[in-house]
Amino acid sequence: MAPHIVNGTRKRKHISEVDAPVARKAEVPEDVGLEMQSDDEGDEGEDGSDDDDGEVDDFPELDARSDTGSEEEDSDEEEKKGEEEEEEEEEEEEEEDSEEDSDASDDSLRIFPKAKLIQSDITGKPKKVYPEIEPNYDSDSSTEEDPNRIGNVPIHWYDDLPHIGYDINGRKVLRPARGDELDKFLKTVEDPSTWTSGFDKSTQSDKPLTAQELDIIRRLHANENPDAEYDPYEPTVEWFTGKGKEEIMPLSAAPEPKRRWVPSKWEKQKVMKIVRAIRQGRIVPNKPKTSTTDNRFFNIWSEPSTDHPPPLAAPKPRLPTNAESYNPPEEYLPTEEERKKWEETDKEDRDRDFLPQKYAALRLVPAFDQFIQQRFARQLDLYLAPRIQRKKLNMNPDDLIPKLPSPNSLKPFPNYRALRFLHEGGAVRCVSISPDGAWAVSGDEQGVVSLWEVIVGREVKRWKFDGKIGAIQWCPRTDISYFVVGVEDHLHFLVPPNISPSILSATQTVLAPAELPPAPTSSSSIKWVSTSSTSIETSTKPILTLHLPLSSGLPKQIVWHKRGDYVASVSGADQGSVWIHQITRRHSQAPFKKVKGAVQLVLFHPSKPHFFVATQRYVRIYDLAVQKLLKALTPGLKWISSMDIHPSGDHLIVGGYDRKLCWFDLELSNKPYKVLRYHTRAIRSLAFHPTYPLFASSSDDGTIQIFHARVYSDLMTDPLIVPLKILRGHDVHAGLGVLQVRWTPGLPWLVSAGADGTVGVWCH
């Protein structure tokens, strides 16, 4: 039974015995569903002192008249005595009821197994006997036996011993055999369960983890709750709200203190003390700061900084010499010529600010007329003095130059001219080498195209066209043999003589097929005109001619795709001058409707469907498959004159008329990786070797620069660029030097065409 709270300020409601059960049913539900009993309560139940018949005591009401004064205290005491007598009577009745219900309470709870009542063999009295507990089911003890029973002993104590502990019988537990790291690796490959096992220190062996342990590890690794049954979004259980769950007892039964509504006299005394001090003038409010007494000027050299090393000392003034004396020696006094020269010299150029003078006595020395200027100069010295001491690095400038390998270790590369082929018609603007490296074709300004052997320089055939030869390029395919010549508004396809019948037949099938392919859906302004195959061998006319649009101009570049089916030509200076021709379909198209700037050069990527277009100052990369701009390179040149791409397709070199050569790493940036300045005049041509790590550049200064350019497959290693050789052999004619260079496939040989009308073959 709950104890009754009796206080001078509280009164208990008197509820009659007849009305009490009705009131209790309204306040507390009949069956809450909770059963709880401790060991002490169970013992009390057996003695017959447990249970209070389910009665609930009402909370005593508060009497508002409890604080009125001491006049009602006497009446309250009389009421207390009467209430205490009533409580004693009720307690006696409840004790009798609890004895009757004690036997039934044990059976209703069913917390422990039911006991049997037997007669003791020793005392002869009845006693309760409970069934034995099976450890496999009813006990929390583990059924798994640990063979090592050393307890909480550091396992490293057994590192030098053959055993790792002792079992339950005191016998040694031998250390299990463990292989080396290679055995562990092979075990992880052969046995899949190795990945789901853990090392047990007590047994020095690997034990497989259960599915529940693996699930806990997975949840911890994923930052989840280890308990799979935990629901973070389960509905809230309202324990203290709702019908039948109202709190019927307060948290505290203490009466409300008087300090809640009565002013504190101690605070009043403290406030009055402060008020009296203010009235007497002992407490003065802070005055506004109108002027600061601190010194605004301070010596910056006096206090060293705590965060930084101490600054340098102030520069000391120059000490006076004999020339500044009032009675200097005769040799310090200036002559009339020196005085006149000093007066005519500017103040900034004078050796000293004064002229030495001699006085008979110190009292005759007047005031120094340069005193203010000297003090001002001294202040400037202090103000402009350095505050930081910087250490000067003493190093050899040659150490800053990167160490390059010797050119002798980078052979082979061309280093002398072995052959010279002469054109009598003037400057040779273009030259091209056959894919097998045996033939060379060159053209001059008089319209003469010569085919000659690279090894001996013998001319095999000559073609004559009306107008200048702007560009020549050999088809890169090896199963057929022909080259393209660019003349004014025309592209001529020529077949060289003395080729095998199979190659000749394949070439005729490609350039002059018996059945023409179907006409493309989109029309083109370029006409394709073929010559009959019967007159090819005896005629000097081209087998195929492309008529470019009128006023297109002289084709200044012809470039082939690596597969030999597409050829691009550039002529004129507008965007309509770029054409891409497909040989098998006999179709030409202009890839650009509008291009910013005048197109100078174009290139095909060796392995990707990318198209490089060089204008006067920029190089743009287009994707022909998706027809969009990928990247715009900024070489920083005033006028781009030539460019070539590395066989790997990741590097590009661009030359300009302002004598600079830019190397681009296409995977790195749109700015040049390296800029080379080796020529003294405009760069005319650039060319990468298809197989050797070499590239060459020619210029109007009449020289050819040979470079070693090794590109590594490792993306972390920069390309190695080493200048190897300067080839001189062409004369400068009308301000023009070497106009074009081309490499011989398969050999480190170079063929150059010059403005002096000669073509040179450079060998190693």
Image: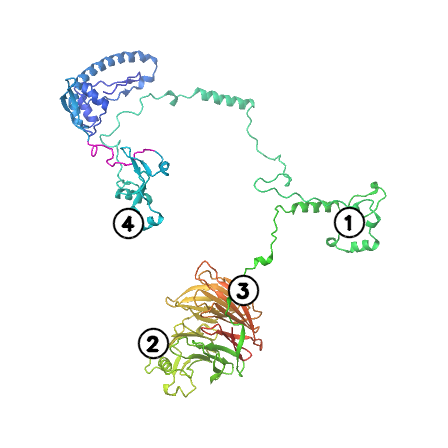
Identify the residue under disc 2: 520
Q: Is residue 637 visible?
A: no
Work out how far the residue at label 4 is from the one at label 3, CA to CA, in angstroms: 56 Å
Does 262 appear in magenta?
no
Identify the residue under disc 3: 406
Identify the residue under disc 4: 192
User: What residue occupies the far right of the structure in this picture?
Assistant: 360
Secondary structure type for disc 4: helix
Secondary structure type for disc 3: loop
Instruction: Tell me which numbered mark, 1 or 3, is placed earlier along the sequence.
Output: 1
In the rendered structure, which amino acid carries the disc numbered 1? Phe
Quarter where residue 38 is shown: top left
- Relative to 305, is 187 on the left or the right? left
Identify the residue under disc 1: 354
Q: Is residue 372 visible?
A: yes
Contact between labelled residues 4 and 2, with CB atoms less than 8 Å apart = no
The percent position of residue 499, horizontal first and vertical second, equals 40, 82
Work out how far the residue at label 2 is from the one at label 4, CA to CA, in angstroms: 62 Å
